Amino acid sequence: MAAADLAPKPQTLDYIQAAAVPLSALTAWEGLFDHGKLAAEQKVLIHGAAGGVGSFAVQLAHWRGAHVIATASSLNLAFVRDLGAEQVMTEPNGIPPRSRRQEKVSPEREYLKRPSVPS
């Protein structure tokens, strides 16, 4: 692998988070631009906008200048708006499904609390 193809790990991410970035971001990029041919001023609906691929898709579509409509749990409404979604659709009654009621996207998610490998 050429050194030009590498980038340093951002200091704000641990190794687990950093390992997820390339595949999630590439999946979002390919879906939006390579397959979807998304252009500025178009509208795009992104399901699961608070998830790994969805959170990158919202940011990339917003960056491209598209009108971003997203779906997410009401617990993640502010998070998805902060990513760049202009409209966010949540559950019809505003109550997340029972199995996900306590879930909220944040850097402090339980599975990310594992000890990090020192940089």
Image (tube, rainbow, N blue to C red):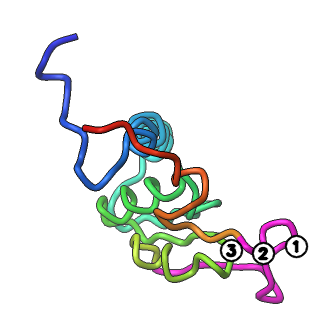
Residue 34 got which mark?
Answer: none
Q: Is residue 71 above or below residue 74?
A: above
Name the residue nearer the viewer: 84 or 66.
84
Give me the residue at 77% from left, 88% from top.
94
Residue 98: image tag: 1
Q: In what quadrant of the picture does the C terminus appear?
A: top left
Q: Which residues are magenta?
A: 86-102
Residue 101's tag is 2
Type of amino acid under label 3: Ser
Q: Is residue 109 left or right of residue 68?
A: right
Mark 1 surroundings within 10 Å by alpha-carbon count, few (fewer than 14), some (14 through 19), many (20 or more) = few
Pointer 2 local density, CA inside 10 Å: few below 14, some 14–19, many at least 20: few
Choose between 40 and 19: the one closer to the eye.
19
- Residues at marks 3 and 2, CA–CA distance in whole angstroms: 9 Å
Q: CA distance from mark 3 to mark 1?
A: 11 Å
Is label 3 in a helix, a strand or a loop?
Answer: loop
**Please, what is the dominant secondary structure of the magenta stretch?**
loop
Is label 3 or label 1 in front? 1
